Image (cartoon, rainbow, N blue to C red):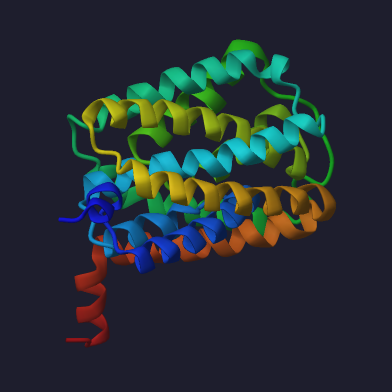
Amino acid sequence: MDDFSALFMVSPLMLAALFFIALLAGFIDSLAGGGGLLTIPALMAAGMSPANALATNKLQACGGSISASLYFIRRGVVKLGDQKLNILMTFIGSTAGALLVQHVKSDILRQILPLLIIGIGLYFLLMPRLGEEDRARRLYGLPFALVSGGCVGFYDGFFGPAAGSFYALSFVMLAGFNLAKSTAHAKVLNATSNIGGLLLFMIGGKVIWGTGFIMMAGQYIGARMGSRLVLSKGQSLIRPMIVIVSAVMSAKLLYDSHGAAIAQWLGIH
């Protein structure tokens, strides 16, 4: 094995492809979540084991979520001081989830997750005025931090797909934020849970650092591009993106779980 293969575990051409896939994933993630739908299969297709792919995906995902978070903080959309408790609960939840997933099977969650994601897509599709403007807040302080940060953070550390959408939905439903503002705040918590999950994978020694950092650069660029559209286009862009990403992600998860049965039902051999 040459030095390049030892560092990146992929060929130079595949590394370039992964960079651009990460850029697109970062763009999509900053608007609606679901970027892992692209990056995890790409890493596995590049020849990485599932454990290496998941660990390296957490590293590269940090690039996108941190990039978007910094953009929204600098623009004054997110006040970091107001999010301290949410960030703390998210970090605790994500590390707990990442620790637990190494000892238990996530098969049940894998079965019900497509239904949850379909629910998110339908919710935004059938309620066109949802998130148009700020509404009355339903939860404050620790209760909100436990639900929006701790619970969703735990899910992100334990499994992960569509975590960004769950964060955004919690800010819309429980904090009363408009959709653009909710998406901005979701990125800060998403960055926190990505970092928390990454720390656990680092301890396990599963991260492919060279490939992860190259993809992180792509994620950073893509997320910065998408973040600008969040503030300029707002709900008119975010809502259809959430619906589309939810539909595609649900279809993929359903196929991953029941692909053989679906193929048999369709008469595909």
In-front residue for pair 232/117: 232
Task: Tally the marks.
Answer: 0
95 relative position to 173: left or right: left
In-front residue for pair 218/92: 218
- Report the residue at 58% width, 64% height from top: 244
Q: Residue furthest front?
A: 3
- Report the residue at 66% width, 29% height from top: 174
Please tell me in which quadrant of the rendered image residue 241 appears: bottom right
**Quadrant where the C terminus is found in the figure:** bottom left
Q: Tell me if residue 123 can be seen.
A: no
Q: Is residue 132 above or below residue 236?
A: above
Residue 143, x across and y down, in percent = 58, 15
Please tell me in which quadrant of the rendered image residue 39 appears: bottom left
In-front residue for pair 47/269: 47
Q: Is residue 25 above or below residue 80?
A: below
- Report the residue at 35% width, 64% height from top: 12
Q: Tell me if residue 215 can be seen.
A: yes
**Quadrant where the N terminus is found in the figure:** bottom left
Residue 222, x across and y down, in percent = 61, 54
Residue 199, x across and y down, in percent = 36, 26
In-front residue for pair 78/239: 78
104 relative position to 169: left or right: left
- Report the residue at 70% width, 24% height from top: 138
Residue 43, x across and y down, in percent = 33, 57
Please tell me in which quadrant of the rendered image residue 191 appears: top right
